[in-house]
Image (cartoon, rainbow, N blue to C red):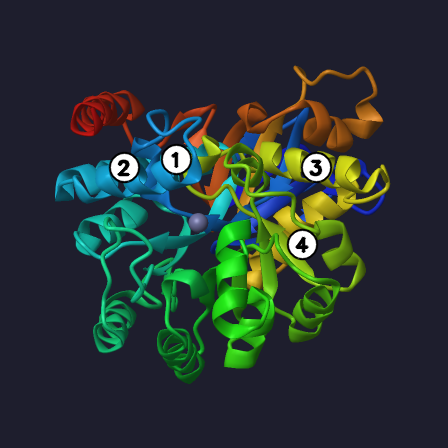
Amino acid sequence: MLLIRGAMLPDFETGTTTQADVLIRDGRFAAIAPHLEADCPIVEASGLLMLPGMADLHTHMVQSLTQGPLDDLNITQWLTRMLQAQWSLTEDEWYYGVLLGCLRSIRYGVTAINEMTYYPHIDAVVQAYQDAGLRVTFGIGATDIAENDQIRVTPVDECLRQAEELYHKWHGRGLLRTAAVPQGRPACTPELMRALKQFARERGLLYHTHLAEGKAETERIRAWTGRGEAEELAHLGVLDESTILAHSIWLTQEEITLLAQSHAVVAHCPSTNMKLSDGAPPIAELLASGARVGFGCDGEASSANRDLLREARLGSYLQKVRTLDPTVLPAGQCYAMLTEQGMRALGYRDVGRIAEGWQADFSLVRTETLCTVNRRRILTNLLYAGSGEQIDSVYVQGRPLLRNGQFVHHDLEHILQRCEEITARIERTLA
Ligand SMILES: [Zn+2]
């Protein structure tokens, strides 16, 4: 048991907070009341904001090692060099890269990620997820069309074998879940897109892919098929409530309606969209049509960022300026997308809210350094002027992963030192 005493609990609809004590038992919120007594360890949280755990809906964690040398390149150079760097990694380097990415997510209050990873050294990748301690839904990014000479294509049968291997070894083990993960229609034949969806449906798994990220790729799909990319995915029968679509930028109005009707979830990754000049996705229109949307930090080779709160701020601002409408993507909606709605997109029905009976994923956030004298409005201020740097402690199922800004189970200095050596080696490889 654990008692969190005197934290500020948020109400995202009103934008206000209420002070309360929260008792955690067996990994769940057991009681919430103004004053609780319990014979157990106590965390004094007066002045701290308690946020539900956040869900990052689109990640490539190994790219924590390729942040930097790929900045400000055109998209062709970016993809080629990113893959060159990625394929040069040893098993040990994969482990440290993925671990660092996961720890950075935890540092910023993320307790669940949706990860597209790659096959070589998959055991080391999974070891890193487990050692990090957060919830991970993951799959091998499958591709059977070579977009450039660095792409490693895999036949449909082998992609299915890999997905099956992952499913049997790790699905449901601890906090791990596996998914079916085709990289996207520009990199996958209709056979592969369909086969992985069938695989996912038969096992009740998520289906995670990229959609309409680049204008040129989307035009290529239209030239191949006569359909927009979302229309093509609907035609292939792969859109439903268990499908997560990263980016979703180049959509027609008909495709926006189609995505809303399918109940598929769009993972909005604004840093990547802006930094790679992909374009600004029609998130305001998607939300107005009733589509489900969450946020993702993507890989750091493109976004340079694992701070999901900052990502939500950028996403909100991008839509406000795109539509010339300051009412779109308000703070309360951003928080709901970051927490309960994001967790629901990943299939968690009892994670992402601080309420009795729900799983105890949460963070404690320092508020004394926020840029405001209005204590009643710290939620909007945290989103619009703060950052994940304000997060002090992070718990998953009531288990602390970060406390007082320090990782409980990891020596960050050692991990950073190892990763610095690896990135220096990558820079030499790319030179
Ligand atoms: Zn991606």
Displayed quadrant of residue 239: bottom right
Q: Is the residue marked 3 within 8 Å of ligand 1, measured from its CB? A: no
Sequence-first disc among 4 and 2: 2
Q: Label 1 belongs to which residue?
A: 301
Q: Label 3 belongs to which residue?
A: 318
Q: Amino acid at mark 3?
A: Leu
Disc 4 to disc 2, C-alpha distance: 35 Å
Q: Which mark is residue 97?
A: 2
Of discs 4 and 3, which sits in the foreground?
3
Q: Amino acid at mark 2?
A: Gly
Q: Which mark is residue 355?
A: 4
Q: Nearer the viewer, residue 25 or 235?
A: 235
Q: Amino acid at mark 1?
A: Ala
Quarter occupied by the C terminus: top left
Residue 193 lies, in percent from the top left, at 41, 74
Q: Is residue 333 left or right of residue 185?
A: right
Sequence-first disc among 1 and 3: 1
Disc 3 to disc 2, C-alpha distance: 30 Å
| Residue 245 position (above or below residue 414) | below
